[in-house]
Image (cartoon, helix red, strand yellow):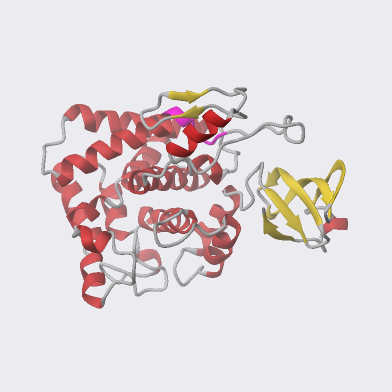
Amino acid sequence: MGDNLFGENGELVLAANTVLTQDYVQRIRKLNYNGVYIEDDLSKDIKIVNIINDRIRAQTVKGVKDIFICTENKSPISKKKFKNMQNQIASIVDEILENPNLMVNMVDLKVFDDYTYFHSVNVAVLSIVIGTSLGFGKEELCNLGFGALLHDIGKVFIKKEILNKKGILTDDEFQEMKKHSYSGFDYIKKEFGVNRSAKIGILDHHEKYGGGGYPNNLDGGDISLFGRIISIADVYDAMTSDRPYRKGIKPSEVIEYIMGSSYVLFDPDLVKLFIRKIAPYPIGTIVKLSNGLTGIITENYESYCMRPKIRIFKNGDDDVTPYEISLADNESLNITVTDVV
């Protein structure tokens, strides 16, 4: 194991440097992890730094799950649960502020199979990263994180058959689904004493920069800043996630989609910040190149997000002595990544 593996409640499942036996592999599969870090001779010196601690992430997922379940069951949310969530958001903000120059390796955010709750945490982390790039202070980042964490709370008021439908929604079903933004905003306004920007971010996260979004068909700067931020994080995580009706799309392809949707769906200035902080090819990913070489990603660059450093270990089907190239160097500009293995 190349890194610690934590369970849904933040408990340690397997420690780093554990030798993976077949029994361990089967246990990992039963727990619905979609991947782990493996350390071998090729990758043993590659350092992967998580954007946030896995234990904090798992504990935050449990906290948001408790909030969703209480809301769905129409149970009162205790002050303790509300305070725990605020503390968890503050912990995430502290960790991100300690590493403001770190690019997000999305493998670190895609661990469990419990989509709704992990999606909420992922969107919060990504939103806070964007807010950090904008120079937000801790209080503003905590407000942004809280709104992002509960951006989909309104979905608990949508019929389960619509939420879980695998096919395309009918017009009536989609109109029903669109109510979740306002329902979430209205619920948070009534139940939580939170910052107004956080509440408006929940309301606005499906508005489109070029217009045509919901619930108020706003555009451009009329959409709240928090709403514009959360919308990018929401779409990115949703598209890169495995769903019952499709596999997750590669991070590099989703980044290209977001870049291409500037001005239409997303604030172009925020998109520029976002693509500087998200690694399209996470460290440890094995890729094929246009010149027939195969290698493992060892480093990413903020200014050249699609041009990482790669440790080459194959030429076609033949193994080669490992060596590194950077696609950002002038002599490598004619080489591109063609596939992720």
Q: Quadrant of residue 298?
A: top right
Towards the viewer: 153 or 194: 153
Can you say whether 175 is above or below 272 in the image? below
- Magenta stretch contains residue 54: yes
**Residue farthest along the bottom direction in this orientation:** 171
Task: Please tell me which residue lies in front, 59 or 4.
Answer: 4
Q: Is residue 118 above or below residue 263?
A: above
Q: Position of residue 44 (x, y in %)?
A: 72, 30
Q: Nearer the viewer, residue 222 or 268?
A: 268
Magenta stretch? 50-55
How many numbered badges does the structure rendering display?
A: 0
Q: Is residue 79 magenta?
A: no
Question: Quarter of the image holding residue 238?
Answer: bottom left
Seen at 57% across and 55% down, the residue is 251
Residue 191 left/right relative to 333: left
Q: Is residue 90 left or right of residue 321?
A: left
x then y, percent, for residue 322: 85, 41
Specify whether residue 192 is in view.
Answer: no
Image spot of residue 278 (x, y percent): 57, 49
Residue 136 occupies quadrant: top left
Residue 169 seen in render: yes
220 relative to 275 in the view: left or right = left
The image position of residue 16, as x and y in percent, is 58, 24
Identify the residue at the far front of this view: 22
User: Main structural element of the magenta stretch: helix, strand or loop?
Assistant: loop
